[in-house]
Image (spheres, rainbow, N blue to C red):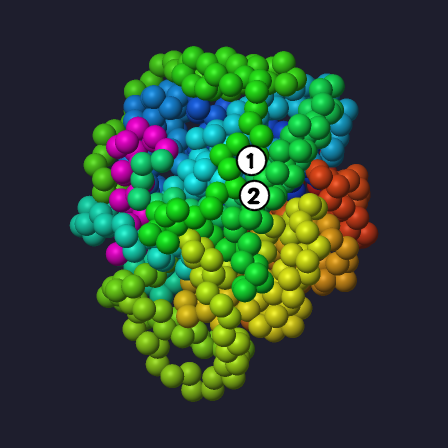
Amino acid sequence: MLEANWTGASTVPSRGLYPHQWSWDSAFIAIGLRHLSPLRAQTELETLLTAQWGDGRIPHIVFNPSVPLDAYFPSPDFWRSSTAGRAAGAPRTVQTSGIVQPPVHALAAWLVHRADPGLSRSRGFLARVYPRLAAWHRYLLHRRDLGGGGLASVVHPWEQGMDNSPAWDLPLSRVTPAPARSFRRADLDHGAAEDRPTDLDYGRYVRLAADYRDAGYADGTGEFAVEDPAFNALLIASEHALARIADELGATGTARHARAERLTQALVERLWDPASGMFLCRDLRGPASAGCDAAGHDAVGRDTVGQASVGHDAVGRDAVGHVTAGQAPVGRDAVGQATVGHVTAGQAPVGHAPVGHATVGAATAGDRGPVFSPHRPPARPTAGHEAPAPDLDPAPTPAPAPAAPAPAPGLIPERGVSGLVPLLLPGLPRDIVTALLRTAAGPHFGLGTTTRLLPSYDLLGEAFDAHRYWRGPAWFNTAWLVERGLRTHGERQQADALRESALELAAATDFAEYVDPYTGEGCGATGFSWTAALALDLLHGESAGDTTLPGGMSATHGTTIANSTNSTNSTTVTADMGFKGGNRR
């Protein structure tokens, strides 16, 4: 399936629903591809980085010009990157979106290098990608430090990757939606209404994206700004990876390791909630955030080399002496001049772009509420949705958790898997690690007890729904991240169990996009690229030589690869979890 989703330069998440290149998808895909073809894994990342903007941002979609405009919405003529993004240094030779996704890329680049260091060195892979990755981190640490406390903020729910998480309900409630008549709900052609966002929420996503575009993609002016724990944890992990890359290139990574440690401290200071036993999101636009303590604008330590903005004609040099990303535009005008709600025919992806969530008052025709499973507790109806008909044979509803003190001002009181992803970080205080482990295994997430795979949202939360995207279903990329985190902190037994469950469900569901956390039922697209790629990585474990990951993370999976054979022109992962092929060059 990875072969089927390969375009010649990159891998689409799913050929039918997601016909372009997505940013963090490509990072996860490269992590798996490195076991089959390190060259293709390097190419995956290099293709993405050629679309980097002059200010350093890596856009969340790179559009394939051979795909018809009506195959996906929002399409290139909605984003208008080469014209609306001109001041931010958007490239003119490729069309992209204007928002970003979580920064997994430096971690991916380091792991890809480790898969075949000889090939990487002969191609100059790290020397070419390092300056672009350094520019990407500078953008996040400077332009996106909207709270002044050292952490990066997301300015649209799609940027965080967990698109319709209930954590966004409160900040999105302040956004005036684009009129429903101004865009076409093409996503409803490919998914049941009860699994999809409401028209109201979809309109809010479109409004935020259009306002950001119309402001020239300038940061800090929009109605939505949130500090997210997973986004920042991945930035920290990738900062450790950049330190390793700098060492490999003959420079020193000491300053980057130190910056990652300071970022970890800022993460704890700003997003840790002892009452919840996990990290929570911080709403920077809510009234409760006014006047809250910040960790200090310079707390994370700023780059002192190459400080000229990596803008339109910026050159700038990093610590290794390479030219930073800065693309002088050449050539082509934007495709189209669509308005806020440019109407296109075709497919809206499931889980990547206009996917949504339910907020107060968001009922729409056809929104029938959660789908029940006989093997899981019935979800309580979210405000704005019809209450579902009673389950004829309902499973017992979990007992509510004991009342806990309210989170600190500015923190959003919703538990999501994002708050467990910081387990990935080796520098977390031990008491916080212990609390995260307790929360993951407790009634809110049921890891190793009531669920087959880690849910994306609190099992006891008002908005929980096991089939509605990031409002409850389990995803393979977050399972992979938490599995790494468990292993990082010596929780081998839990890590092994999570790994085995992820591999079993990936095979049983034909590598589904996500699954019901209780039953393991596959949902969304099948043949999903990051599911297949991360299954490959879990299978290989230490066979790829990843005995030491950035920041001291351990990857000694101790796994055996079953039924493996090598052949050219094939990257199919079979249902019995063996795999075919892959020319390692």
> Circle 2 — which element?
helix
Which quadrant holds the C terminus?
top right
Judging by the rendered image, the residue that carries numbered circle 2 is 266
> Circle 1 — which element?
loop
Say what amino acid the circle numbered 2 marks. Answer: Ala
Q: Is residue 203 magenta?
A: yes
Q: 434 or 585: which is nearer to us?
A: 434
Q: x, y percentage for residue 19?
A: 43, 40
Say what amino acid the circle numbered 1 marks. Answer: Ala
Mark on residue 299? Answer: 1
> Position of 374 compared to 173: left or right?
right
Q: Which residues are magenta?
A: 200-219
Q: Is residue 185 magenta?
A: no
Q: Main secondary structure of the magenta part?
A: helix
Q: Residues within 10 Å of mark 2 (few under 14, many from 20)?
A: many
Residue 254, picture quadrant: top right
Query: Which residue sits at x=41%, y=70%?
Result: 462
